[in-house]
Image: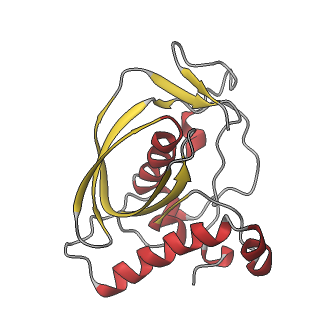
Amino acid sequence: MITMKDIVREGHPALRAVAEPVALPASKEEQDLLRSMLEYLKMSQDPETAAKYGLRPGVGLAAPQINVLKRMIAVHAHDEKGTLYSYGLFNPKIISHSVQLCYLTSGEGCLSVDRNVPGYVPRYARITVTGTTLEGENITLRLKGYPAIVFQHEIDHLNGIMFYDHIDQENPFKAPENAIPIER
């Protein structure tokens, strides 16, 4: 089971490295690790389990955050309508995106960042992601709004990019032009 002590923190070199593709089919070890990442997210969102194991609630986790430089992400998040997006993906890739941007009005957080970083993080409002599921199935996901933000945040981790790299340093709360504000 992954715990908070397994999650590397800001400043760790794995967070700035570019992760390697996973050779498919994924090994049993890689599948178990990705399953464990997804399990962490599910347990972290249950208040009792989170309290019992000292888990910080999260909606996404990328392998570099647990010091594994492989292109693997787990997402367990609900959209604005309550639809659950729960995926463990190998080699996720954004294959297309909208011109229009969006941002979380509350800003973004990260399990690897223990401080509050104020500011808007511009993201694409709509994206199409491909990847391979835990079951070995190639899938294409069309995402918008909050799930799109979560997937972009996690895929950024695979490329050594932190969410605050996107924040305008001069004016952190300057809303991106023509962007959709998303409340959370």
| Left or right of 21 on screen, residue 54 | right
- Residue 68 point in image, percent of width and height: 44, 73
User: Looking at the picture, does residue 78 appear above or below residue 106?
Assistant: below
User: Looking at the picture, does residue 136 appear above or below residue 152?
Assistant: below
- Residue 29 point in image, percent of width and height: 36, 86
- Residue 85 point in image, percent of width and height: 46, 53
User: Looking at the picture, does residue 91 appear above or below residue 178?
Assistant: below
- Residue 19 point in image, percent of width and height: 36, 62
The C terminus is located in which quarter?
top right
Give the image's coloring scheme.
secondary structure
| Left or right of 26 on screen, residue 101 | right
The N terminus is located in which quarter?
bottom right
* Point 45% across, 48% down: residue: 151
- Along the line of sight, the residue nearer the viewer: 56 or 133: 133
* Total numbered labels: 0
**What is the residue that sits farthest to the top in this orientation?**
178
* Point 65% across, 18% down: residue: 174
